[in-house]
Image (tube, rainbow, N blue to C red):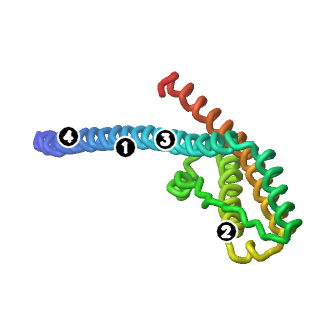
């Protein structure tokens, strides 16, 4: 009989401890799963925000480039270079600074969040934008102003061609972002 009482005194607390431990583990696991689900929702929201911001920046640049008839502009500038060369003058165009990558630079460290299908076209577009900004700086330099009319015309032509390529890259990047955002909205059931 003493053995039965001693067993009850040991088994009861052990059983209570085991049940408490099981409840604690279950609660910890449920909390951790809820945290992970919340982190995933936050990551998806951040990814969508980044994509929308990049898409808006690309659209703004495309709208500016489309408003300017690049072919007509290049023809006019070529005529100006040639006219200046014929008259023995030097024509140096005014080239504004090119900064079209503010959003991209802000999120550069978070590009890994973007879907694979978006990364390449976005990076190609922004690489071209950065190259255009570098070329604009070259066109604003003292070296450009003394390069001679023919070389200046060639460099300016290349500058405009770079902008035309940027337009093509922009269309691809914008399309990839648009498609990715549509898929994300669809996965969430159409919410924006």
Q: CB of mark 4 within 8 Å of CB of mark 2?
A: no
Which residue bears the numbered disc 1?
32
Mark 4, secondary structure of its residue? helix
- Going 48% across and 25% down the picture, which residue do you hit? 191
Q: Residue furthest top?
A: 189
In front: 88, or 20? 88
What separation in Å lies between label 1 and label 4 (alpha carbons)? Answer: 24 Å
Q: Nearer the viewer, mark 3 or mark 4?
A: 3
Mark 2, secondary structure of its residue? loop
Closer to the chain start, of discs 4 and 2, is 4
Q: CB of mark 3 within 8 Å of CB of mark 2?
A: no
What separation in Å lies between label 4 and label 2 (alpha carbons)? Answer: 80 Å
Within-10-Å neighbours for mark 2: few <14, some 14–19, many 20+: some
Which residue bears the numbered disc 4?
16
Closer to the chain start, of discs 3 and 1, is 1
What separation in Å lies between label 3 and label 1 (alpha carbons)? Answer: 25 Å
Which residue bears the numbered disc 2?
140
Q: Nearer the viewer, mark 3 or mark 2?
A: 2
Q: CB of mark 1 within 8 Å of CB of mark 4?
A: no
Q: Nearer the viewer, mark 3 or mark 1?
A: 3
Mark 3, secondary structure of its residue? helix
In front: 74, or 188? 74
């Amino acid at each position: 009989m003493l053995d039965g009482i001693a067993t009850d005194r040991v088994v009861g607390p052990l059983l209570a401890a085991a049940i408490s431990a099981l409840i604690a583990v279950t609660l910890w696991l449920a909390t951790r799963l809820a945290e992970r689900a919340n982190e995933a929702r936050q990551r998806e929201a951040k990814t969508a925000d980044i994509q929308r911001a990049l898409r808006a920046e690309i659209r703004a640049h495309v709208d500016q480039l489309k408003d300017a008839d690049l072919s007509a502009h290049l023809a006019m500038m070529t005529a100006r270079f040639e006219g200046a060369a014929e008259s023995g003058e030097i024509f140096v165009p005014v080239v504004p600074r090119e900064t079209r990558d503010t959003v991209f630079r802000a999120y550069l460290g978070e590009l890994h969040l973007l879907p694979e299908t978006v990364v390449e076209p976005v990076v190609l577009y922004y690489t071209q934008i950065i190259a255009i900004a570098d070329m604009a700086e070259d066109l604003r330099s003292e070296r450009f102003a003394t390069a001679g009319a023919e070389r200046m015309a060639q460099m300016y032509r290349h500058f405009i061609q770079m902008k035309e390529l940027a337009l093509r890259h922009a269309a691809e990047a914008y399309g990839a972002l648009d498609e990715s955002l549509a898929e994300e909205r669809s996965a969430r059931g159409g919410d924006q």
